Image (cartoon, helix red, strand yellow):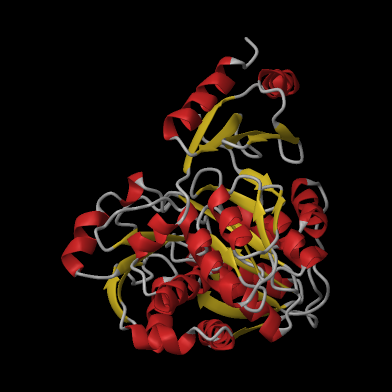
Amino acid sequence: MAEPLIVSISGVRGIVGESLDASVALRFSQALAANLAPGPVTLSADSRPSGRWIRRVASAVLESAGREVIELGIIPTPTVGVAVRRLRAAGGLHVTASHNPAPYNGLKLFGPDGRVLPNGPAGRIRDAYLGTEKFQPARWDGCGSVRSCEEAVRWHADAVLDAARQDGILEPIRRAGFKVLVDGNGGAGGPLALLLLGELGVEAVAWHCEPDGNFVHPPEPTGGNLASLGPIVRQAGVDLAFVLDPDADRLALLDSGGNFPSEEYTLAIAADGILARRPGPLVINLSTSRLSEMAAKARGCACIRTPVGEAHVVDGMIAHHAVLGGEGNGGVMDPRVGWVRDPFVGMTLVLGSLALSGRKLHEAIGALPPQFIVKDKTALVREKLPAWLAALKKHWPGWAVDERDGLRLECPAGWIQVRASNTEPIARIIAESTVEAEATGWIREAVALMPAE
């Protein structure tokens, strides 16, 4: 049976030529045009080859609806946010399937503030797409126009460099003489990564940084998917490696020995370095490792947790005037640059932290308290979820309870979270402890408590 199209407040995502075809792109673009405030709309894509025809469909629809379309080309997801604000657009449509495998693509929505559309307006577009409304095109004399903008990547690089200058890390990075391997994996982020690192004075070894959509390893930057990179990093003789996902909103790190420490260390090291120089709140989600929380508290800074999802983290950052925010999947957000997970901010902050401390990456990792986070999933019948969560609370009495996003239970030794997936009939289970076997054991106990069919 073909995999169904995923339709949510985040947009649409599916397998090209199966659940995602031209009719989906057409109607979704119509729903967007009908529900955004007046004004131009940016249009862009990651490097997947199917993005070419999806963009042409979307452009024609937006123009037929009377919109000015500003074509940005193939760019990273966070660059869209920078461009939308700079161009004062009503919003943006970005063609991307993020870290999904090559057969997938999708459409992602941005609001005028440069962030991914929050629940309210995104929900209206989703409902319009799913509804039966017939969208009215513009009259013959009210059609829109199309123009190109090629400056977005430059604007993004300048914003990151300006933030680094403000933080006093620009010159230390330039003096440090770093040599770094960049794995673009054929995605959209390679050109910007090389541009930025060049201006930071970093010697960059490019590894598949052409944005051609040719993924040489599975696109999600996780340990198993990056195993083939270890020997390449060692042979290159670099200080560390940066790895991007296809739409370049996540950043993974490898040390000089080609070792992958976990995507959780990206935010933790970035936060540890910047909060020492510019103290203030850090906002993370409920599924993020305690490494980031510990880094903030060691610098005397508050750490605020939100439900999972970039939009929730952004809401928390705005509410608490955060210095930095992010998620444990390798996402880092600096509000001075934008409201989207930004690996280019992450690169700069990690390099700044290493430059100021004089440490190698493996030394910076070793300086953080040892934590082991284990991520798993299991099939879920949603009707069983309330009873299961109740059983978990009973099983671990005295643990602190947080029910804002599924169930998160925490004790001094660690924590466990169980939450239903928004897109699949599964539950995601994450546990973290100072002892890996303990985290694994908690997950095993949690699964055993699931009510029988």
Q: Nearer the viewer, residue 193 or 327?
A: 327
Q: How far across and how far down the image is residue 412, in percent?
A: 61, 37
Q: Is residue 33 above or below residue 258?
A: below
Locate residue 318 relative to residue 106 in the image: left or right.
right
Q: Quadrant of residue 399?
A: top right
Q: Relative to residue 139, is residue 124 depicted above or below?
A: above
Which quarter of the picture shows residue 391? top right
Does 361 sit left or right of 236 as displayed? right
The location of residue 23, given as percent across then percent down, is 62, 53
Q: Residue at x 56, y 79 (%)?
A: 72
The residue most toward the top is 452
Q: Is residue 436 above or below residue 186?
A: above
Q: On screen, 400 above or below 80?
A: above
Q: Is residue 444 visible?
A: yes
| Residue 396 in the image, given as x and y percentages of width and height | 66, 23
Quarter of the image for residue 334 reads bottom right
**The one of 224 and 394 positioned closer to us in this rendering:** 394
**Residue sitting nearer the eye, 426 or 261:** 261
Identify the residue at image location x=56%, y=15%: 448
Task: Report whether residue 22 is seen.
Answer: no
For this view, does 116 lie left or right of residue 167? right
Rendered residue at 35%/62% (across/down) = 363
The image shows residue 152 at horizontal and vertical percentages of 56, 83
